[in-house]
Image: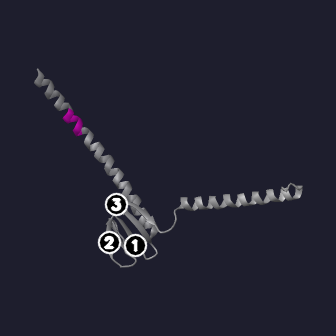
Amino acid sequence: MLNTKSFIVALAISLLQVTVRPVFAASQDKDQTQKVAKVKADVAKRGVGQKAYVKVKLLNNTEIKGFVSQAGEDDFIVADSKSGAKTTIAYHEVSKVQGKWLSLGVKIAIGVGILAAAIGVVIFAASKSLDDSFGLQQR
């Protein structure tokens, strides 16, 4: 009796693994495909040539700096600006691609900071002007 129950439990677990594992694997494949497409788009956006400077962070935490000298279907080549050494990088090995220039979010934050400082200066100057015109100076 105990052997029959153990057999049924083992069979149920086996069937569960067979049905769940492919669904999980398909989800991982879709995520990987989307990530590769994003990296390809980032590299394509920067272009190719000495003005296409990038800093690439790989999944193993290695950083490669240089310019994109060639971009292919499965990989791209980063050439070191100083030594000229070329490194071929597969898109699926990339964790992050950064350009040399500031991102849009950083540019917006800088603009907001400058605007806030300008408004502060105008308010300060206006309050000084009002104080002078009403004779509210401290003695």
- Give the residue at mark 2: 87
From mark 1 to mark 3, how far is it between C-alphas?
A: 16 Å
**Image coords of residue 87 (percent x, y):** 32, 71
Q: Quarter of the image holding residue 109?
A: bottom right
First of labels 1, 2 by sequence position = 1
Residue at 63% over, 59% down:
113
Which is the main secondary structure of the residues drawn in magenta?
Answer: helix
State the separation of the CA atoms marked 1 and 2.
9 Å
Label 1 secondary element: strand
The earlier-in-sequence mark between 1 and 3 is: 3
Circle number at residue 44: none
Residue named by callout 1: 66
* 53 in magenta: no
According to the picture, the residue beneath numbered tag 3 turns out to be: 61
- Work out which quarter of the rendered image holds the C terminus and state it: bottom right
Marks 1 & 2, CB-CB < 8 Å contact: yes
Q: Residue at x 70, y 61 (%)?
A: 118
Question: Residue visible at 67% across and 57% down?
Answer: 116
Counting other residues with Cα less than 10 Å from the Cα at mark 1, is it few (<14), some (14-19), or many (20 or more)?
many
**32 vs 88: above or below:** above
Label 1–label 3 contact, CB within 8 A? no
What is the C-alpha distance between the residues marked 3 and 2?
Answer: 15 Å
The residue at 18%/28% (across/down) is 9
Which label lies toward us, 1 or 3? 3
**Image x and y of residue 63, in percent:** 36, 65
Magenta-drawn segment = 13-18
* Residue contact at pointers 3 and 2, CB within 8 angstroms: no
Toward which corner of the image does residue 5 lie, by quadrant? Answer: top left
